[in-house]
Image: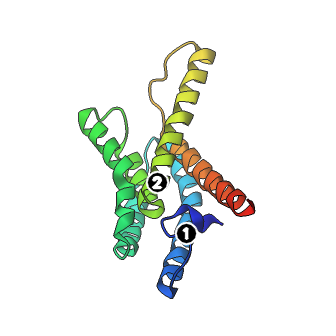
């Protein structure tokens, strides 16, 4: 079940059950939002603050009751450091998107999203270099973050389901 990819594997009280259901709603809402961010990032090379700020604020308020999820923003913090070193490497919208994902999924899953994002990005850059015979200059990151999110949700769900069968 998709709720297994979060910190609480099983609801131990009614409050835990409510928080797991809220997390499930957040993840299900996040997936189409990530597709929209990917589209706007590819088309306009920006992720609009008019969507990232309200979503971040809502998720932040929800997660105030579960402070462990704040560790999920660690990958976004690392990208923020990269942004301060060289703003040309990554956009602020990508950092905000990864922070939102981190707040929703928690540390383990957000690290997996970041790792899978890097793998997908590396594969794309290698393919581009082989086909076009030149280096990639600017890449929209939101599609790769979305790929990392989808693979994380799918893999975690499959692994947890297979673990129940054993």
- Furthest toward the top, the residue is 133
The numbered disc on residue 9 is: 1
Q: Visible in this render: residue 102?
A: yes
Q: Residue at x 39, y 67 (%)?
A: 54
Residue 106 at what x, y percent from top left?
44, 60
- Residue 151 location in percent, x, y? 61, 48
Q: Nearer the viewer, residue 166 or 69?
A: 166
Q: Quadrant of the C terminus?
A: bottom right
Circle number at residue 108: 2
Q: Look at the picture and state if 8 lies above or below 101.
A: below
Residue at left offset 40%, top offset 71%: 58
On the image, the x and y values in percent for residue 165 come to 75, 61
Q: Nearer the viewer, residue 132 or 95?
A: 95
Q: CA distance from mark 1 to mark 2?
A: 13 Å
Packing grade of label 1 (10 A; few <14, some 14-19, many >=20) is some
Q: Is residue 158 left or right of residue 96?
A: right
Q: Is residue 65 left or right of residue 14?
A: left
Q: Is residue 140 left or right of residue 161?
A: left
Residue 30 in which image quadrant? bottom right
Within 10 Å of disc 2 (Cα), the crowding (few <14, some 14-19, many 20+) is some
Q: Secondary structure at mark 1?
A: loop
Residue 43 visible in this rendered orientation of the protein:
no
Note whether 70 is above or below 90 in the view shown: below
Residue 100, position as x, y percentages in the image: 42, 59
Q: Which residue does the image show at 70% across and 61% down from the upper left?
A: 161
Q: Earlier in the sequence, mark 1 or mark 2?
A: 1
Relative to 5, is 120 above or below? Answer: above
Under circle 2, the secondary element is helix
Outermost right residue: 165
């Amino acid at each position: 079940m998709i709720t297994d990819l979060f910190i609480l594997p099983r609801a131990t009280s009614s409050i835990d059950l409510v928080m797991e259901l809220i997390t499930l709603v957040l993840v299900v809402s996040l997936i189409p939002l990530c597709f929209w961010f990917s589209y706007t990032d590819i088309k306009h090379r920006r992720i609009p603050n008019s969507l990232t700020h309200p979503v971040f604020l809502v998720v932040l308020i929800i997660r105030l009751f579960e402070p462990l999820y704040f560790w999920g923003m660690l990958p976004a913090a690392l990208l923020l450091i990269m942004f301060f070193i060289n703003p040309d490497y990554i956009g602020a919208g990508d950092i905000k998107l990864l922070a939102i994902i981190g707040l929703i999924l928690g540390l383990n899953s957000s690290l997996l999203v970041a790792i899978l994002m890097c793998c997908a990005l590396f594969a794309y850059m290698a393919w581009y270099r082989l086909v076009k015979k030149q280096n990639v200059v600017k890449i929209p990151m939101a599609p790769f973050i979305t790929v990392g999110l989808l693979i994380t949700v799918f893999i975690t769900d499959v692994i947890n389901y297979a673990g129940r069968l054993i």
